[in-house]
């Protein structure tokens, strides 16, 4: 005697549980907005505060090419931080060179700075702070939309693309501004032959990785937004 075959039942679907609750996402978005405001104010105030100190001592990166006549070029590689290089002869009073941690570049301290020199000397940190603020401001509406019922219905793809552009611009401007300050200070000192402006150091590999990741997110959100728009048109 065969047992009756039970009626087929639909396969049970696993519960749809969010990895992060919408309330947590909104709270994170609020925190990102607050941090962005802080970075915006701090980044601007850091450079503007330096400009208000002029005329005073400005500190810029330089490369020591030679010291007194007869000294070998590049012969001052040292890792003793804040050690003055007495063999480097500079015109005027209140000008001296000290060693830095990396031993490849040195710090030129020069009295009688201009406001622009002071501003550009701290421009690298100001650029990083402002760029981080822009990224955080762009990220906040993305988080807000993820907490809503339709996370791909807005223009999040453009926001991720704008983040990528911001990171790229910050990577270029970050080392450029202190180099401009170095050139201005050396020009004010009459271009001493023992010093030169250091070459720009662009960390291309990590920057390219971050930009590529942001562009991939932009493309993923663009495709999701397109599908969301098509589904909306079918309803």
Image (cartoon, rainbow, N blue to C red):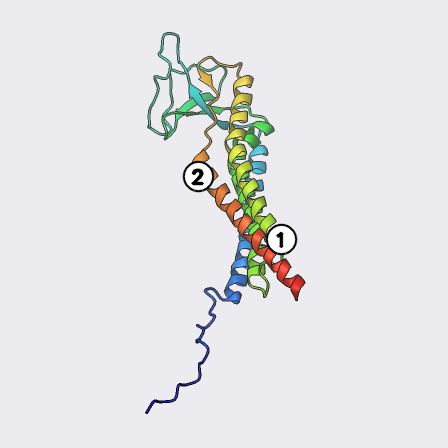
- Front-lying residue, 143 or 42: 143
Name which residue lies at 66% across and 67% down.
235
Say whether residue 139 is visible.
Answer: yes
Within 10 Å of the Cα at label 2, are there few (<14), some (14-19), or many (20+) other Cα atoms?
A: few
- Front-lying residue, 153 or 205: 153
Which of the 4 image quadrants contains residue 48?
A: top right
Say whether residue 53 is visible.
Answer: no
Relative vertical location of residue 103 with respect to residue 137 in this rendering, above or below: above
Which x, y percent locates residue 47? 56, 36
Taking 17 as reference, is 188 left or right?
right
Residue sitting farthest toward the top: 70
Q: Secondary structure at mark 1?
A: loop
- Front-lying residue, 132 or 196: 132
Which x, y percent locates residue 136? 55, 50
Which x, y percent locates residue 120? 56, 30
Taking 60 as reference, is 80 left or right?
left
Name which residue lies at 58% across and 33% down.
51
Relative vertical location of residue 190 with respect to residue 99 in this rendering, above or below: above
| Quadrant of the rendering where the N terminus is positioned | bottom left
Q: Secondary structure at mark 2?
A: helix
Question: Who comes first in sequence, dot 1 or dot 2?
Answer: 1
**Residue 52, label in figure:** none
**Residue 155, label in figure:** 1
**Nearer the observer, disc 1 or disc 2?**
1
Residue denoted by label 2: 206
Within 10 Å of the Cα at label 1, are there few (<14), some (14-19), or many (20+) other Cα atoms?
A: some
Which x, y percent locates residue 78? 33, 24
Name which residue lies at 37% across and 17% down.
74
Q: How many marks?
A: 2
């Amino acid at each position: 005697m065969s047992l009756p075959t039970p009626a087929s039942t639909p396969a049970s679907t696993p519960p749809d549980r969010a990895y992060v609750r919408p309330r947590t996402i909104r709270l994170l978005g609020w925190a990102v907005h607050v941090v962005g405001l802080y970075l915006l104010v701090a980044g601007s105030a850091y450079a503007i505060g330096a400009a208000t100190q002029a005329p005073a001592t400005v500190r810029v990166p330089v490369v020591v090419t030679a010291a007194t006549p007869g000294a070998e070029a590049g012969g001052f590689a040292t890792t003793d931080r804040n050690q003055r290089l007495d063999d480097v002869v500079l015109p005027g009073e209140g000008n001296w060179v000290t060693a830095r941690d990396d031993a490849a570049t040195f710090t030129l301290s020069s009295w009688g700075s201009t406001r622009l020199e002071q501003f550009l000397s701290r421009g690298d940190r100001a650029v990083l702070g402002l760029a981080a603020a822009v990224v955080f401001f762009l990220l906040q509406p993305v988080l807000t939309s993820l907490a809503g019922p339709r996370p791909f219905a807005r223009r999040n793809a453009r926001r991720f693309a704008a983040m990528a552009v911001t990171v790229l611009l910050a990577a270029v401007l970050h080392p450029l501004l202190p180099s401009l300050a170095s050139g201005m200070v050396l020009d004010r000192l009459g271009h001493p032959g023992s010093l030169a402006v250091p070459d720009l150091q662009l960390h291309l590999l990590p920057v390219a990785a971050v930009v590529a990741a942001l562009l991939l997110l932009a493309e993923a959100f663009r495709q999701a937004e397109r599908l969301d728009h098509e589904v909306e048109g079918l309803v």
